[in-house]
Image (tube, helix red, strand yellow):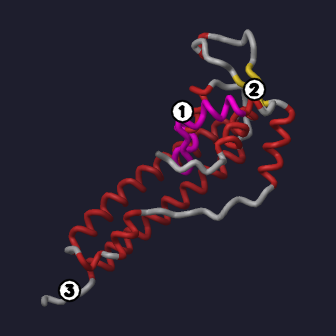
Amino acid sequence: MKENTGKTKYILLGLLAHQPQTGYTIKKAIEYEYSHFWQESFGQIYPTLKQLVKEDLAVIMEGQESDSTRGQKLYQITEKGKKVLITWLEQAPEIEKLRYELLVKVSFGEAAEPKVMLEHLDDFIKRNDKNIREMNFFLEELSKLRLQGDDHTYKELTVLSGKYFYTAMRDWALEAKHIISERKVDPS
């Protein structure tokens, strides 16, 4: 189970600030747009939506069901919800916590054959290359939207961060492979 950071409330308010949504469309938006750096489960989304309504931060839009909502409740942010979202946006973010099992394994790498670490690094490079291609695709799509007069500057900045992050991690892995490959192994 994913650790509950207490931020689900703000993530949902941010998504509802864009447009009214159902729990299902919120989950899909998180999977599509934010999965590289944020995850939320249905088990976090639905109770939080209930709580947002209870706290008058969101309302259920009555009579707004359509084919796209499949009979689900459609939630909309309230003015009070917008104020709570703005207050959270103005606060300094918590310091990020990085967890990469690969880095732990590399730090203990002398206990394994070099080829094991090289294989792990090859897999890591492939994953980062895939992520970089995804970020480039998203940047192209956002550029097309900008040409149509649809401004998504902040989404573009988020995607750009992902592109730079994955590029840096891939470049580190390439250098790590080079260092391991060039390292003289003591035959004892």
In the displayed structure image, the side of residue 13 where residue 115 appears, left or right: left
Which residue is most to the left?
188
Residue 25 coordinates in the image, percent (x, y): 59, 27
In the displayed structure image, the side of residue 48 where residue 111 appears, left or right: left
Whichever of callouts 2 and 1 sits on the residue coming sooner in the sequence is 1
- Mark 3 secondary-structure assignment: loop
Q: Which mark is residue 5?
A: none
Q: CA distance from mark 2 to mark 3?
A: 62 Å
Q: CA distance from mark 3 to mark 1?
A: 50 Å
Q: Residue at x 49, y 66 (%)?
A: 168
Say above or below: 84 vs 185: above
Q: Tell me if residue 66 is in the magenta stretch.
A: no
- Mark 1 secondary-structure assignment: helix
- Where does label 2 land, which residue? 76
Residue 83 coordinates in the image, percent (x, y): 85, 41
> Disc 3 vs disc 1: which is toward the camera?
1
**How dense is the environment of label 2, judged by Cα within 10 Å: few (below 14), some, or many (20 and up)?**
many
Q: Residue at x 81, y 43 (%)?
A: 84
Q: Residue at x 46, y 50 (%)?
A: 131
Magenta range? 31-51
Q: Which three-letter amino acid code belongs to the residue tagged 3?
A: Val
- Where does label 3 land, which residue? 185
> Disc 2 vs disc 1: which is toward the camera?
1
Q: Which three-letter amino acid code belongs to the residue tagged 2?
A: Gln
Q: Tell me if residue 49 is in the magenta stretch.
A: yes
Quick one: quadrant of the C terminus?
Answer: bottom left
Residue 13 versus residue 53: which sits nearer the camera? Answer: 53
Q: Which three-letter amino acid code belongs to the residue tagged 1?
A: Phe
